[in-house]
Amino acid sequence: MPFEIVRNDITKMSVDAVVNAANETLLGGGGVDGAIHYAAGPELLAECKTLGGCKTGKAKITGGYNLPAKYVIHTVGPVYRDGKHGEKDLLESCYRESLTLAKENDCETVAFPLISSGIYGYPKDQALEVAVDIIRGFLLENDMTVYIVIFDKSAYKISEKLFSDIAEYIDDNYVDEHTDYNRESMRFNMPMQPAMAEEICECKGMAAPDDLDLKLKRLDESFSQMLLRKIDEKGMTDAECYKKANIDRKLFSKIRSDMYYRPSKPTAIAFAISLELSLDETEDMLRKAGFALSHSNKFDIIIEYFISKGNYNIYEINEALFAFDQSLLGA
């Protein structure tokens, strides 16, 4: 997917460029800065000494040396005081300057740490919001794969209100429905007489065995056909749709060219989010791909939460999914 939050060691990311949260001297320090210098080797420090430092909010590029990345983009984030001394503007500039350097050097993949969220004290939820907003805007106009790399859960945080609201929604919808689901599963695992099977199939909208051939002959539009129809109905371009869905252009081309393409569930939901479909429309699109939303699945409940709130920001949805250790939307 073009934008992804991952839990990893940034010094082990095999990308075109890793971004270093540096200090103004560019001569190494603690945290991510020290880890990158250590992994890259002394040649990185030697090159950094020739650059004359770097101002806060700006960025400079060097080779990657012993890192699996070709380049290191060094950017200096702001020290957080109270949020009233231009910290946000400077942090936004860090991401813009770094992405611009990556583009100028033909980078296709870039990995960022969460800049200024460590010893510089920028509140983690606000730092994440700035990062996601700038990266999202960049990806709407450019083709690149961008990662935010989180070393551990303590380095990652969404807003407390959003987290608690989602947790409450999961609690309200998951426990009771999960119990009902188990009870129904037990009932359907019991042996049934043919007449009972036909009756249950009819109630559930399923095809009885004798009726299967007839049902197969009445297959309606495929997922791909529905997706393309919805794009036209919404007045969107293909690019607008797949970029808002956090989907790679190459994958979208496969879906467009293959009438019977079967996407993964996160991919199908990503397109529903991009198209801003209602919950019923989302369920319909999922059925075309052979899936459904279930209250026995936390991933599904989180998706339902955002759709019910009319929030179709796929990046914010992915922030929440990552916080709850769920799969991200996209492909």
Image (cartoon, rainbow, N blue to C red):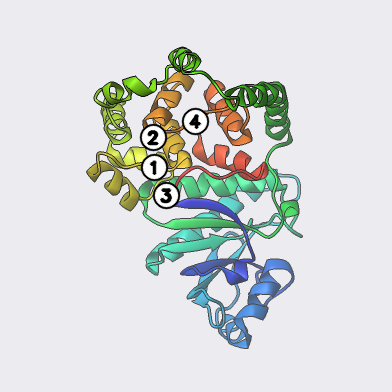
Q: Please report contact status of discs 3 and 2: CB closer than 8 Å, yes or no.
A: no
- SS at badge 2: loop
Q: Earlier in the sequence, mark 2 or mark 1?
A: 1
Say which mark, if any, is on residue 263: 1
Q: Earlier in the sequence, mark 2 or mark 4?
A: 2
* Crowd class of label 4 (few under 14; some 14 to 19; many from 20; radius 10 Å): many
> What is the C-alpha distance between the residues marked 1 and 3?
22 Å
Which residue is labeled 4 in the image?
312
Query: Which is nearer the eye, 294 or 181?
Result: 181
> What is the C-alpha distance between the residues marked 2 and 1?
6 Å
> Going by the image, does 216 lie left or right of 42?
left
Q: Nearer the viewer, mark 4 or mark 1?
A: 1
Residue 86 appears anywhere in the view: no
When asked about the image quadrant of residue 77, the answer is bottom right
- SS at badge 4: loop
> Going by the image, does 183 lie left or right of 252?
right
Amino acid type, label 2: Ala
> What is the C-alpha distance between the residues marked 3 and 4?
17 Å
Q: Nearer the viewer, mark 3 or mark 4?
A: 4
Q: Nearer the viewer, mark 2 or mark 4?
A: 2
Q: Which residue corresponds to the image point at 63% horizontal and 87% vertical from the top-left? A: 42
Q: Please report contact status of discs 2 and 1: CB closer than 8 Å, yes or no.
A: yes
Say which mark, if any, is on residue 139: 3
328 over 273 or under it: above or below: below
Which residue is labeled 2 in the image?
289
Q: Earlier in the sequence, mark 3 or mark 2?
A: 3
Q: Residue 46: image x %, image y %?
A: 59, 87
